[in-house]
Image (spheres, helix red, strand yellow):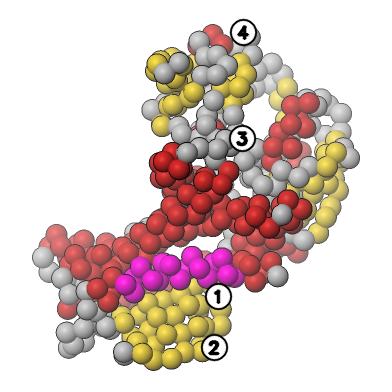
Amino acid sequence: MNILIAILLLGIIIFIHELGHFLLAKKNNITVTEFSLGMGPRLASFVKNGTRYSIKLLPIGGSCMMLGEDEEVEDEGAFHKKGVWARFSVIFAGAFFNFILALVLAFVVISSVGVDYPTVLNVEEDSAVYEAGLREGDLIKKINGKRIHFGKEIDLYFFFNPITGEPIDVTYERDGEKYETTIYPKPLPPHYRLGIQYSSETENAVLLVVEPGFPFYEAGITAGDIITSINGTPIKTGQDMVDYFDANPLTGAPIEITYIHGKEEKTATITPKLVTSGYSLGLTYNMYREKVSPLKAIINSFFELKYNINYTISSLKYLLSGKASINEISGPVGIVTIVDNIVEQTEDEGVGIVLLNLANFATYLSANLGVINLLPFPALDGGRLVFIIIEAIRRKPIPKEKEAMVHLIGLALLMLLMVFVIFNDFRKIFG
């Protein structure tokens, strides 16, 4: 059932993407030869007004094939016969429709459960934050010039920008007035670490990063594994794990971890590692959602879309910089696993909560697909847009056969990446 849910989720997101191309193509009188959901052999199809509508075997893609998209065709309905900006709008529409879908889903979730405003909950005395002037109840607005709308955005910022000894500029609001200050992180005394990163925002206690050279990594636990208990204490959500370690600070004593690797539940005994470096802010901030008015739900839906786009872009930069392993990439099989975990972790709370959590995940997936498709890589929408922009600048199209060859090479590389990602997904499950 969860596999079917994941397929349906992906199918809707891909359908909306291809629908964007389709509607703009029809709007610009471009002949669409085939509009399909899925890849591979056709399972079912029919023809209407010159367009074949198909459902294909593999639910991992889709297409809106247009006449004259990759070859010269003497037909007024051919893609290449239309103006530069007409073609630009057709190609861009796929990602744009994904952003619209993400926006709608974000509104549904926020209308139902509210917003996690970035309010300061606790400031440790004599900490870096205390000395900078922040106090309980302050609302964080910016960190080093980066606008902050949600508590999870603080998590995201410090995940991709770990705290060092460098000063941190913060803008905050108190009693309706804005203030600016600079935080000077304080060196931590010797302390124990596990070498993991996780978030209180996740529906389950999934490990986002497992650092080489630290206990979890050495125990064979990998990013994507889900913690289910610590020393016999059940752990259901990311917040549960945060609360556990807040109440049980690490020492040199071993701890017993139960976790899910793929579909298998495993147990490991982990001994925290003593670290003699690091920095602290002494800050606790809000991660819980509170209900908001319909108007604020609309406004914050745009901020949620921005958050998910930024999350995708930051993750790509993180991967390309070498800070994350390519083995941490997940594809369709990984998405099925995540959906399975979401349903498992929330089914006791009722169908409504399950659907909201799936909608929240779909918000990220849809924004992610929009961003990835706009990357300037051959065969992707972004690669096609590059050729259109070049044509607009030089006022002369690049020969179709050369453009088609570039996209063919790009498609081959994407297929190789897809094979690797699917293999990697199965390796995580059965490894």
Q: Which residue is mark 2?
A: 43
In whole angstroms, how far apart are the C-alphas of marks 2 and 1? 11 Å
In whole angstroms, how far apart are the C-alphas of marks 4 and 3? 26 Å
Q: Which residue is mark 4?
A: 126
Which residue is pictured at 28% across the width and 74% down the height? 25
Q: Is residue 36 left or right of residue 211?
A: left
Dot 3 surroundings within 10 Å: few (below 14), some, or many (20 or more)? some
Numbered disc in front, either 3 or 1 = 3
In whole angstroms, how far apart are the C-alphas of marks 4 and 2? 67 Å
User: Does residue 124 sit above or below 212 in this rendering?
Assistant: above
Earlier sequence position, callout 2 versus callout 1: 2
Tags 3 and 2 in contact by the CB under 8 Å rule? no
In whole angstroms, how far apart are the C-alphas of marks 1 and 4? 56 Å
Earlier sequence position, callout 1 versus callout 4: 1
Q: What is the number of the mark on residue 288?
A: 3
Numbered disc in front, either 4 or 2 = 2
